[in-house]
Image (tube, grey):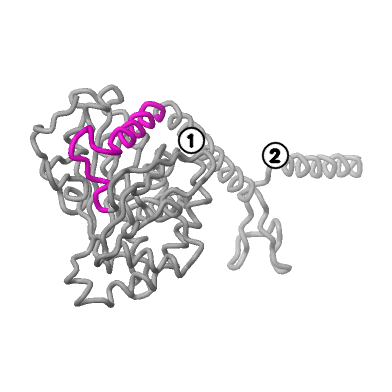
Amino acid sequence: MSNPSRQRIPVNRFGLTEVASPSPVKAEVDVVFVHGLNGDPHNTWTSETTKVFWPSQILPPILEEEKARVLVYGYDADVTSFTDGASRDKIHNHAEHLVAELVANRRIRRASERPIIWIAHSLGGLVVKRALIYSSEIRGVKTEHLRSIFVSTFGILFLGTPHHGSDIAQWGNRLEWICSAVLPKKLIDTQPQLVDALKSNNETLQNIDRQFIQIMSRFHIYFFHEGKPTNLKGTLKFIVDETSASPTVQDVERAVIQADHSHMCKFENENAPGFDLVAEGIQRYAEEALGKVKQRWDAEKKERSSAKQAEAAELVSGSVKVTPQSESTSSFGDSSLGRQQKALPSTESQARFDEQFEVEDVTREKDMA
């Protein structure tokens, strides 16, 4: 079923890379991978032992019938990329860029309405959440194409993403543990201020969590948590524990992957712990997405059409109103400087206008007689 010997596709460090396609047939669903803190669009998803890059080597055959196209997204994911700088939310910057790139990639392929399924590891899940929040809030006519990511998203698989953020102090500890798990020890020892900066930014990360709750019922969601602890300086810890990574939420799936935080997203082969769970979730979402997303697009188009009709009606209504005149301006006088212009009368106004002059004409005829 799998093909680990499949030729490796060069992956761009930044931006989107298509690593699998159902060519020559047209793709019907996009599967997009987003890495987390200190991650890489290739290494995050590659086994350290077998060097298998599972998004392109063992996943595509499973999605053959669903005609899925697989993409990986890369961005600058060092610690400073998850902290605020100059009063700007850098996660929001990542989210805007992700939305813009994915919209452009799909539009030039005439695939803006194609369903999307996300797979995100660790803090990459926060970037995906922020991207969907950003896309969902767009209402402008000139930027409505950026809303397509929100409309087209069907499902999200979160691998070790921290969700439960009610305890601010606990969030700070959790972020510190993520840093310790994924950053080189030398960097942490020599630049502890980077970790402190991430911890101090936990309220921004919490806000993303709160905003996402408002739209999450729209999506199919699968939470995965790590089943093995990570050795942090001689102490075994669950970096993102079950309570945070897989909170109990109505109508949301949850499962464990028997690996630590850094390795839960690296499958060495199709028999690796957790692979069947993740692959089946992607396959099922891809199978169900086409009809559901089409319905969403039909509803979206109707809503946009209604909004445009309402706007047009408002403009027409406003255009038939007579502009108020000043006391010094005659309604029927000659043109002069300062005279205010009137809009054309409506049908009802015209009828009253005609009736008035008809009465005056009849009266004048009687007087003359």
Question: Quarter holding the C terminus?
Answer: top right
For disc 1, the marked residue is 301
42 displayed left or right of 280: left
Question: Quarter holding the N terminus?
Answer: top left
For disc 2, the marked residue is 347
**Residue at 39 percent of width and 42 percent of height:** 148
Q: Looking at the image, do the residues carrying marks 1 and 2 touch, with CB atoms under 8 Å apart?
A: no
In magenta segment, residue 284: yes
Looking at the image, residue 93 lies above or below residue 359:
below
Q: Nearer the viewer, mark 1 or mark 2?
A: 1
Query: Residue 330, can we see it?
Result: yes
In magenta segment, residue 60: no
369 displayed left or right of 234: right
Q: Amino acid at mark 2?
A: Thr
Q: Amino acid at mark 1?
A: Lys
Between 213 and 293, the one lying in front of the other is 213
Task: Tell me the element at label 1.
Answer: helix
Residue span colored magenta: 262-289
Q: Disc 1 to disc 2, how far (Cα)?
A: 32 Å
105 displayed left or right of 174: left
Q: Quadrant of residue 108?
A: top left
